Amino acid sequence: MRYYLIVIDSFGIGADSVASEYGDVEANTALNICKAVSGPKWAFLQKIGLGNCCEILGYQLPGCEAVSAPIASYGVLEKKGFGKDTLTGHWEMAGLYAKSEMRIFPSEYPSFPASLVNELETAAGRKIIGNKAASGTEIIQELGEQHMKTGSIICYTSADSVIQIAAHEDVISKEELYEICKKARTICDKYNVGRVIARPFTGNLKDGFIRTKNRHDFSIALPGVTLLESVLKPMGVEIIAVGKIEDIFNGNGIDISYPEKGNQACIARAYDIASIPSQNVRQLVFINLVDTDMLYGHRRDAAGYFNAITEISSNLETLYGKMCDGDVMNITADHGCDPTFKGTDHTREYVPMLICRKGDSNDALNLGIIRGFDAVMRDAINCFHLHR
């Protein structure tokens, strides 16, 4: 049996019960991008019950309304721990609840304390420029030429607990940048920073600077042992990570990693995995589809986000067709990032949970609202218990 746990990054479906504490009361990623585009939407996601998830929360998703007989059991997940970010969202799926907030830096210059800057400059052997919250695509246009002339590294943050370090690949090789980020990771541990992210780029001032696909995340140590390690591996389940999953978990509990960049590469890898018969395997395939968040949510591109979900819906239908009878697909998200909402931050939202077993003729269940993202992993554990 193969269990596909698919995270559509930032695909929230409405402000949750504590959204007011985060300033996100009116956020609703799915609803607001649907309002931006008329007509029918996302045929496969509708067929399996995305609109039914939204109906649980008391509204209809325009063009992707609830259906009378969804092929998936459907529910709504509410985050139990702190935060509204990638790390704490995925960690909670794996049974680790964030008990406190990670360090968020102020947006205005200087974002980072002088002590941290001094340590980073000493460790890197280079000066820091930037030192503020910024869009990654914008700050390299602003400071790319200065970086190329001086060799200083561009450091910036966002509304997440993160330090991002950008460098042109002709000035600082990606290997050197990774080494700088590893040193920064050690320094940032005592500041309780969630991630240090290497952001290589290429190009020039005249034609524009462009980020490459050589991004690499260096996450803070996990606060405990995940369900991947404590339950699934002792059951003989092989854990396959696709996309940035290995970075999120620092490799903990991962048997095989395919660190593909972008949705299309991740989906193509999923197709390759599905092409191998699953009758004699026990595998959890953990996939993150990042483009919705990285390319469209943070950049406030509702139309782009909509189109990305359209493509995901079609691709997941193809993947479902390739699955063997008895395989399971569980589709969820890690937080929201409403591109129509104020600012460019993530948003604290409920997320969908859609569980469909290939070849299962049983009626779909309304799972209601479940507190705790780890419901997804506990369903996987239950499925592997039943499939011995």
Image (spheres, rainbow, N blue to C red):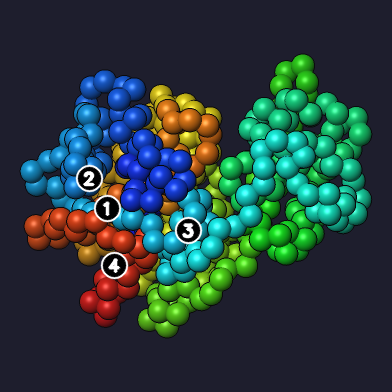
| 260 sits to left or right of 380 | right
Distance from the alpha carbon under mark 3 to that under mark 4: 22 Å
**Is there CB contact under 8 Å for labels 1 and 2?**
yes
- Give the residue number, with chain letter if any, for mark 1: 76
Q: Which disc number belongs to residue 138?
A: none
Q: Which sits earlier in the primary sequence, circle 3 or circle 4?
A: 3
Q: Is 61 situated above or below 55?
A: above
**Is there CB contact under 8 Å for labels 1 and 3?**
no
Q: Which sits earlier in the primary sequence, circle 1 or circle 4?
A: 1
- Give the residue number, with chain letter if any, for mark 3: 82
Name the residue at 39% across, 61% down: 80
At mark 4, the secondary structure is: helix
Density class for disc 2 (Cα within 10 Å; few <14, some 14-19, many ≥20) is some
Distance from the alpha carbon under mark 3 to that under mark 2: 21 Å
Q: Nearer the viewer, mark 4 or mark 2?
A: 2
Density class for disc 4 (Cα within 10 Å; few <14, some 14-19, many ≥20) is some
- Give the residue number, with chain letter if any, for mark 2: 57
Locate residue 314: give its quadrant: top left
Q: Which sits earlier in the primary sequence, circle 1 or circle 3?
A: 1
Amino acid type at circle 3 is Phe
Amino acid type at circle 1 is Val
Image quarter where the N terminus lies is: bottom left
Using the image as rendered, state which of residue 33 and residue 384 is in the foreground.
33
- Give the residue number, with chain letter if any, for mark 4: 379
Density class for disc 3 (Cα within 10 Å; few <14, some 14-19, many ≥20) is some
At mark 3, the secondary structure is: loop
**Is there CB contact under 8 Å for labels 3 and 4?**
no
